[in-house]
Image (spheres, rainbow, N blue to C red):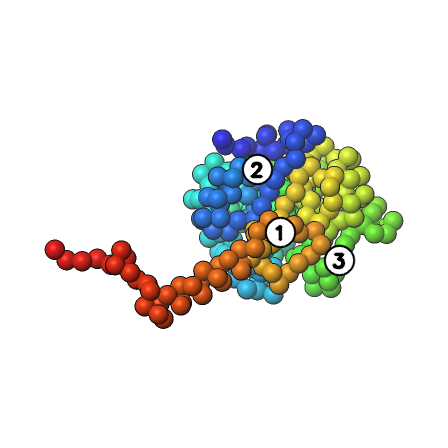
Amino acid sequence: METNINKIISAKGKHKLSMITTYSFFQAKMAEEAGMDILLVGDSLGNVMLGYENTLPVSMNEMRLAVKATRRGAKNAFIVADMPFLSYQTSISDAIHNAGQLIKDGANAVKIEGSKEVKTIIRTLVDFGIPVMGHIGLTPQQINRIGTYKVQGKTEKSKVRLLEEADIIENSGAFSLVLELVVEEVAKQITDRVNIPTIGIGAGRYCDGQVLVWHDLLGINTEFTPKFVKRYGNLRDMIVKCLKEYISDVNEGRFPTDENVFKGE
């Protein structure tokens, strides 16, 4: 069944939204088959797919390829695409052009990090018919400014700032809001305060939905184990085991067998 923006917005207070990152055809195909509410083509592809140290090097071309692959795999899913670093900060016209490209490539909406510094961008994109998902709390694209990945909302000053940022995002016209690494009680206050769905990643139990990175959820990335991740599988060990069996079968002549070869008449 196709999921549209109205279903996402109307979910608030009725049922929790599930969101996962996808970057490729088969990831998207499996996520849609499972019934995921939202597929996020995240700029986290820089870390988990391309081997970058952080999300900053991710380009529009890389994001566009991932969006196209995701849409080919999930024909009816609601897809949100991250706008990568410097694809929207440089000018309003750049933001419109780049967001429009992602929509043309198959996304239903784009996600933008920040608050007051991007409120005009959010409002302009929405006015041009491009739905925007906001993102506050920890904002990975600002890692060089903040210095480290740390939980937000621990102090009164940080709490007040987050509440103000949530108001700005909603008033700018965003249809939903990601809260990343936010103290649970502050995330609850934001969720109760705004009329748009909140989606948490490391923001506790009271958000309107949750998002995890594909490689974390499935136990593929075992080098990164933050507290907020729940692993639903251990695919890394399974994949390595299969690869070792394949190597052994090739070395020992057990593969290919008679059933794997073609024969003449």
User: Which mark is first along the chain, 2 or 3?
Assistant: 2
Q: Which residue is mark 1?
A: 231
Disc 2: which residue:
37
Question: Is 260 above or below relative to 79?
Answer: below
x and y percentages locating residue 132 in the rendered image: 61, 41
Give whichever of discs 1 and 2 has the lower sequence position. 2
Q: Is residue 18 visible?
A: yes
Pick whichever of labels 1 and 3 is earlier in the sequence: 3
* Residue 190 figure quarter: top right
Q: Tag 2: residue type?
A: Asp
Point 78% across, 45% down: residue: 184
**Camera sees residue 122:** no
For disc 3, the neighbor class at 10 Å (few under 14, some 14 to 19, many from 20) is few
Please tell me whether mark 1 or mark 2 is closer to you in this view: 1
Q: Position of residue 233 (x, y in %)?
A: 57, 51
Is 75 placed left or right of 162 in the picture?
left
